[in-house]
Image (spheres, grey):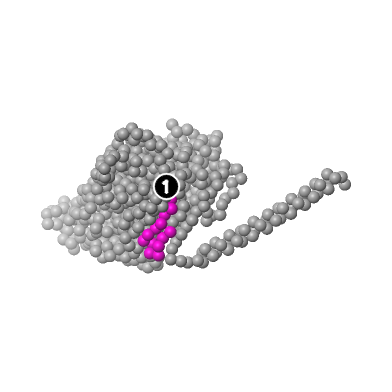
Amino acid sequence: MGKNTYLNIIVTILGILFIAVAVLLIQALDHLRFAVEELQKNHTSGTKTVFIHKNIPEEAGRNRISPPEETMVANQKYFDPAAVSGGRLISAFGADTGNMNMLINNDAYVSQVWSYLTDTLAQRDFQDAGNGKYRPKMAISWKADKENKRWRIKLRKGILWHDFTDPVTGKKWEKVPVTAHDFKFYVDVVKNKEVDAVPLRSYLADLAGIEVFDDYEFDVIWNKPYFLSEDITLSLSPLPRHLYHAYSGPFSGKRFNDDHIRNRMAIGCGAYTFHKWEKGRRIVLKRFENYYGKDLGIMPSLQWIAFDIIQHPNTRLQALLSGDLDMDQLTPDQWINRTNTKEFSEKGSLKKMQASAFAYNYIGFNQKNPLFRDKKIRQALSHLVNRKKLLEDIYYSLADHVTGPFAPQSSACDPALAPYAFDIPKAIKMLEEQGWKDSDGDGIREKDGKKLSFTVIFPGSATLYRKMLPVIKEDMAKAGVKMDLLGIEWSVLVKRLENKEFDACALGWSGTLKPDPFQLWHSSLASIPASSNHCTYVNKEADLLIEKIRLCFDNEERTRLYREFHRIIYDDAPYIFLFAPRKLMVIHNRYKNVRLFRDFLATELLWVPSPMQKLLP
């Protein structure tokens, strides 16, 4: 053999030995890591601490090595390393909104916009969002005392507010860092009783405040133990003082509410910036290129997010078919009867996805109206709803029955309770026992000279309510009950709810796996304008259970309390509880990494191959 041949053999042997040693070393390190993880799992102490190490950014799709999960930023593992930048996602809102200030506008659409604009201290894993472990986002670490009453937060450096020009002063703000003071400002503003933030304030009722130590370290302090203190603490977001307190002197809550020019915009620190709002037409968001998540592997790929304001579901469906919309939700009728076309076929352009929703709809009785103060009347009206017919004819069985204030999937829901049976004779008997009779023969019952008549207000653009409520109205009439219907524009409806100026309302609530009934049901909120207890429900026994639930950290005991509370609400019948509709989603098939978690589609994970990307019109 020649000299080169021997040299090649020696190099090959050395290469094999090097690989073998590397494999053994990696295995040893893995064993060590697993041992450390096991030790951490078995270790208990009086405090809870989570730490995160900053990940080294790498180009997408180029030999990215995933770090150990315990060092990851929240949900980083779900981002596709092959994703490419660019493209858009256009979906639809069924109505426009009054303003963009999420603190004073308790609107689901505004909340959805803000979910793109801002981030929280930490986030649960998408796959187990109800009870999973929190992972860091804006925070790099947190630690709680034994009672979960004081939480020490260490904030990540390098997070920037979105750049903007103040629409009132004309001052330009660029590359302003997010600090601990912005979190304190958020809490102080929400807890300011002049600010129209009653629903949010109810969640922070037991939060004493925030103590700031320096720009990147602060304590979140609770007055007493609260079972959601971890969830609320780690879900806190900052609020830009330089936008909302851009004047000398003390902060004014009234000025915050009435700052209509600034409240037409939204400034955050998240992955997308507020680009423009064409009233009644479209809301547009643009990716924030200075987003801190860019260096942490959680930068979204899509450049544009837009929401077109399209009230009618059939118009939205046509927009989907024509390609003007990229994603939307269908009605049950559309899902069953309008998707048997080539666009929805296996090789078609649109993909259907179905998920359970942690939400329910209802008809709520305003107990300011003397007609609804007697629970026997409310129970009788609950017996006049043909749920079987509604479920089959309106929802095409794409919904689940609801018997109380908790979503059917939640352990808080008592599965032993059945919906009020549709029983017209029983309802008539109950009404007559309470003195309601049709003495003048006009088909409407009366008592003490007052007719058994009321009006249900509902969002005028809501097709399902337009189909469902007339069926209920017809069955009510069979028992001598006159139920009028009034579909109105969303912003007008919200004002009437806030002022409690209505007889009954047909609406919906979304919920969580660990609900706190305080916001909707506690008597202390019944007389407060703009509270979520818009039906002015008052029950002292229910109050006591709510207060016990808020102090209960044992899951089994809290489930028992939830279900006891559920039974009280079921018996009181302040709402006619209807259905938990399924989420019936459609998305264009050009999107990659489409991941459906529990009850939501994680749009931040989506991307589109370069040749298939579309511009924002």
Q: Residue at x 28, y 56 (%)?
A: 575
Task: Please state the horizontal and vertical placement of residue 420, each as a whole percent of the image.
Answer: 31, 60
Q: Nearer the viewer, residue 540 or 163?
A: 163
Q: SS of the residue at dot 1?
A: loop
Query: Magenta region, mostly helix, strand or loop?
Result: strand
* Residue that badge 1 annotates: 119
> In the image, what residue type sits under mark 1?
Asp
As drawn, is 298 to the left or to the right of 254?
A: right
Residue 218 visible in the current orientation: yes
Instruction: Please give left or right for residue 589 compared with residue 525 in the image.
Output: right
Q: Residue at x 22, y 48 (%)?
A: 499
The reply to whether residue 321 is visible in this rendering is no
Viewed as shown, does residue 263 lie left or right of 135?
Answer: left
Q: Position of residue 531 (x, y in %)?
A: 26, 52
Image: magenta residue range: 143-155
Residue 179 part of the magenta segment: no
**Horizontal and vertical percent position of residue 416:** 36, 65
Could you tell me residue 351's position as x and y percent? 49, 43
- Please tell me which residue lies in front, 369 or 105: 105
Q: At x 54% / y 36%, what residue is drawn?
A: 610
